Image (cartoon, grey):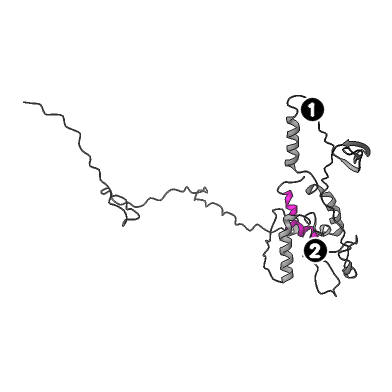
Amino acid sequence: MEYSKLGLEHFTPDYTHYFHALPEAVRDELVPRQWQLHKAIDTDTITAIHDELYHRTLHGGWPDTTLTPGVSVRTAGRMTNTRIELHLEHTQQNTRTRLTTDAVVLATGYRERPLGRILAGLEPHLRRDESDRPRIDDRFRLVLDPAITGHVYVQNAERHTHGVGAPDLGLAAWRSATILNDLTGTNPYPLPERTAFTTFDPRQLTPPTHRRRPPPPTGENGRPPQNRPKRRNAGPPGPLRTPACPHASDASPPKRTAHRPPNPSPAPKR
């Protein structure tokens, strides 16, 4: 699965706006090609599987495990109470095989259901695209006949108009805020202007907003001047003074240490 940080920017409002503005034919071509964004195994899981298989080979032998990419299950049938037969098909070789196993874990995800039964009452007023799908605007509203004054909002049913992020729960808060802002006609949930570092539409390129650093100043000889500390005019040398304490009122007077001369040698006795 494509799970890099920049790859995940396909699941941002910026990409959703970009995708929605594309022609219908381009959108229909993009969605099947982006399956690795949401219909594959993630890197951490496949790495853990590989590490486990590798550890099983450290003491000799080979792990009793089979990995078969590119194989789809056509049908499955129970042979006995404990055995299941799978009819497999290799999508690249166009070959078919059978496999008998004890258990099957189905990780197929979810399948989109048609909206025909739900929207049957609005059928005469719905506007559809070239593939007979409901048209949905950028604010998640069904495009209806102008005679209909109200709006119908949809979520998780707009993959053909809003892209692969339509069923993603990470965008649910943004979708809900967009709908509520439009429904109330106000802006109770302010939304950010930028949500991705990637500029998907080059027509939206803008100059950088940050200020550039000014060029360093040059001296008379064309070289940057050396920053030397300024010397204060200390005046004529005088007696050594103790620097003032920043909190003179709270500070105790400076301690003075008396330096005694070394012990003189004893005087000779007479």
Q: CA distance from mark 2 to mark 1?
A: 52 Å
Check disc 1 and give the amino acid type: Trp
Where 270 sits versus 178, above or below?
above
Q: Please identify the quarter of the rendering in which residue 204 is found.
A: bottom right
Along the viewing direction, whichever of 141 and 215 lies nearer the viewer: 141
- Residue 172 relative to residue 84: left or right: left
Residue identified by numbered label 2: 154
The location of residue 205, given as percent across then percent down, is: 71, 58
Q: Is residue 51 magenta?
A: no
Residue 149 in the image: x percent, y percent?
81, 74
Farthest residue in the top direction? 60
**Outermost residue toward the right in this view:** 95
Horizontal arrangement in the rendering, residue 115 relative to residue 246 (left or right): right
What residue lies at 82% left-to-right and 57% top-to-bottom? 159
Give the side of residue 140 with respect to residue 209, left or right: right
Most frequent secondary structure within the magenta stretch = helix
Front one among 228 and 116: 116
At mark 1, the secondary structure is loop
Residue placed most toward the observer, 230 or 1: 1
**Numbered disc 2: secondary structure:** loop
Image quadrant containing the C terminus: top left
Q: Position of residue 30 (x, y in %)?
A: 83, 52
Numbered mark located on residue 62 in the image: 1
Q: Provide the residue span drawn in magenta.
A: 6-21
- In the picture, measured across the screen, residue 196 lies left or right of residue 221, that is right
